[in-house]
Amino acid sequence: MKLPFAESFKIKMVETIKKSTREEREKWMKEAKYNLFNLKSDYVFIDLLTDSGTGAMSDKQWAAMMEGDESYAGARSYYNLKESIKDITGFPYFLPTHQGRAAENVLFSAIIKADDMVPGNSHFDTTKGHIEFRKAHAIDCTIEEAKDTTIELPFKGNMDLNKLEEVLKKYPKEKIPCIVVTITNNTAGGQPVSMANVKGVSALAKKYGVKILFDSARFAENAYFIKTREEGYADKSIREIALEMFSYGDFMTMSSKKDAIVNMGGFLAFRNEEDWQKCQMYNIMFEGFITYGGMSGRDMNALAQGLREGTDFEYLETRINQIAYLGKKLDEYGIPYQRPAGGHAIFLDAKKILTHVPKEQLIAQTLGIELYLEAGIRGVEIGCLLADRDPETRENRYPELELLRLAIPRRVYTNNHMDYVAAAIKNVYDRRESITKGYVILKELPIMRHFTVELGPG
Ligand code: F0G
């Protein structure tokens, strides 16, 4: 008999989670102003808000924490992390930061000025926020197919090279501080970018004299998809693939809370010394001295170990199989989501589920609220709220896709939890015709409003 798949870890410590009643959830949701970010985590049974900083560290990571060196300058933990980053990414220079957006803040302070153009494949919201905050523009060059959730493509996170070249042709290189390649493409559904596409971007970058920045939060998951889906990579290790990917970049920003499986941390890394030096001042001002920048020694140690574990094939296979498992359950129930299943999450196609809710009443957010009320599961809206208003016209931006992301934390939930999630979605799906009203905005901030927005029934 062929042996079935089984997880590549066993569980050493557990945390209790509690169910609640629908009446309780209705009260809590109302008190939270219908913003899922405002809910106490104790009111959530299965928390799929994010895969960021929510993973379970290993015994080896906890052991590494005990050996952390808390010296202000030149700590052993810094050199440990430097070696791990060099081994896995090939970048010889780096600056620690407290998380990914802090790395963006430091780098963009050094390289982006007003009216610059920053092309990329679906810039993540903090990346876009940091670009627009500096009065520069993020230009999305993701392939069109990513907007159709029904198309099955192995590399649906790719950059459209024609769109990219148009931008590079239109603006002088002085106005383009970098091209952002996000691996995996979170906003488009945790979809990977192929090595062929990275090479194509690199050829254009060279032709027009522009630098490449990898937004690398989920680079190991991206490498896994290259290994398992792209011709010529089946026999290469995850590490070899990661090294090859990064060899096309000039610098990288990293939210270590994802593929490096730590609860807090980030960094930026550089190919050349000059770029590293240019960023040092901002790192010292915003984060901390260049050998700790926002991280304690123990956290740098856990990160150094996490980078190694996060690029282990068996770990990645376990991780990505779990997302695929949930996807398969949803297939059985006929529920529409961004196909194929992503690396870190399932993205439900809210427009196809809640067909009676008008776009002005926040379709994906409405689905998120319904799923919470149904079963205490928390997802996150990737739709109109996240898209923010246009910085010039202040009009709401209505993206083509309204998605509810269910991000799966690393090494945290079992497949029984996935079965529970799938059943809850099916229950909402079965009563979808009766959901005709959504929610309206009562109060919002000018940038990244989704975190704190207050809503009322529409
Ligand atoms: N880049 C990508 C692709 C991300 O997904 C994130 C964070 C960041 C940068 C910023 O990193 O949170 O450490 O400051 N994504 C989280 C998420 C928040 O839920 O997808 P950070």
Image: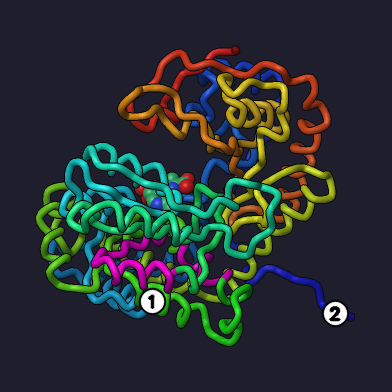
The secondary structure type at the circle numbered 1 is helix
Residue receiving disc 1:
88
Quarter of the N terminus within the rendering? bottom right
Task: Verify whether residue 403 appears in magenta.
Answer: no
The amino acid type of the residue labelled 1 equals: Ile
Residue 144: percent from left, percent from top: 55, 50
Quarter of the image where one finds residue 433 = top right
Farthest-out residue, right? 1
Within-10-Å neighbours for mark 1: few <14, some 14–19, many 20+: some
Within-10-Å neighbours for mark 2: few <14, some 14–19, many 20+: few
Farthest-out residue, bottom? 235
Q: Residue at x 41, y 79 (%)?
A: 244
Comparing 99 with 202, the one in front is 202
Q: Residue at x 62, y 31 (%)?
A: 368
Q: Which residues are magenta?
A: 198-225
The secondary structure type at the circle numbered 2 is loop
The amino acid type of the residue labelled 2 equals: Lys
What is the distance, in whole Å, between disc 2 and disc 1 at their CAs?
34 Å
Comparing 33 with 264, the one in front is 33
Residue receiving disc 2:
2
Q: Is residue 416 above or below residue 204?
A: above
Left or right, 396 with reference to 205: right
